[in-house]
Image (cartoon, rainbow, N blue to C red):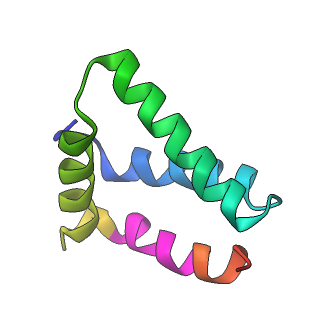
């Protein structure tokens, strides 16, 4: 999980967010959390380990992180609160 390609993660994240945007905010967050927890359980990986690796990926200032940083802008403009 620590070696995830930021570009691929960003593309997959955009697809997920795009599919969730038509649901109410509570449903969006709960759905994302449910999928996350089910996948962690399926892959037998502690959720906290994935949170940490993903937080590091999102906070990395490397050149390939631009697409991931764009997630914040996409959510801000596309997801209604």
Residue sitting at x 54%, y 81%:
73
Please check the rendered image and state whether residue 68 is part of the magenta-colored stretch, yes or no.
Answer: yes
Is residue 73 rendered to the left or right of residue 43?
right
Percent of width and height locating residue 75? 59, 73
User: Which of the 4 quarters of the picture holds residue 68?
Assistant: bottom left
Residue sitting at x 70%, y 80%:
81
Q: Which residues are magenta?
A: 66-74
Residue sitting at x 19%, y 74%:
61
Between 10 and 78, the one lying in front of the other is: 78
On screen, residue 45 above or below 69:
above
Q: Label the magenta part by its dominant secondary structure.
A: helix
Is residue 20 rendered to the left or right of residue 68?
right
Is residue 58 rendered to the left or right of residue 62?
right
Residue sitting at x 45%, y 54%:
10
User: Which of the 4 quarters of the picture holds residue 50?
Assistant: top left
Percent of width and height locating residue 6? 32, 52
Question: Which of the image's four quarters has the N terminus?
Answer: top left
Percent of width and height locating residue 60? 18, 67
Percent of width and height locating residue 66? 36, 71
On screen, residue 75 above or below 54:
below
């Amino acid at each position: 999980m620590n070696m995830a390609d930021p570009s691929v993660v960003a593309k997959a994240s955009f697809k997920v967010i795009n599919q969730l945007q038509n649901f109410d905010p509570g449903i969006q967050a709960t759905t994302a959390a449910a999928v996350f927890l089910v996948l962690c359980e399926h892959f037998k990986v502690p959720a906290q380990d994935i949170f940490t690796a993903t937080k590091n990926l999102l906070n990395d200032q490397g050149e390939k992180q631009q697409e991931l940083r764009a997630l914040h802008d996409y959510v801000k403009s596309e997801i209604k609160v």
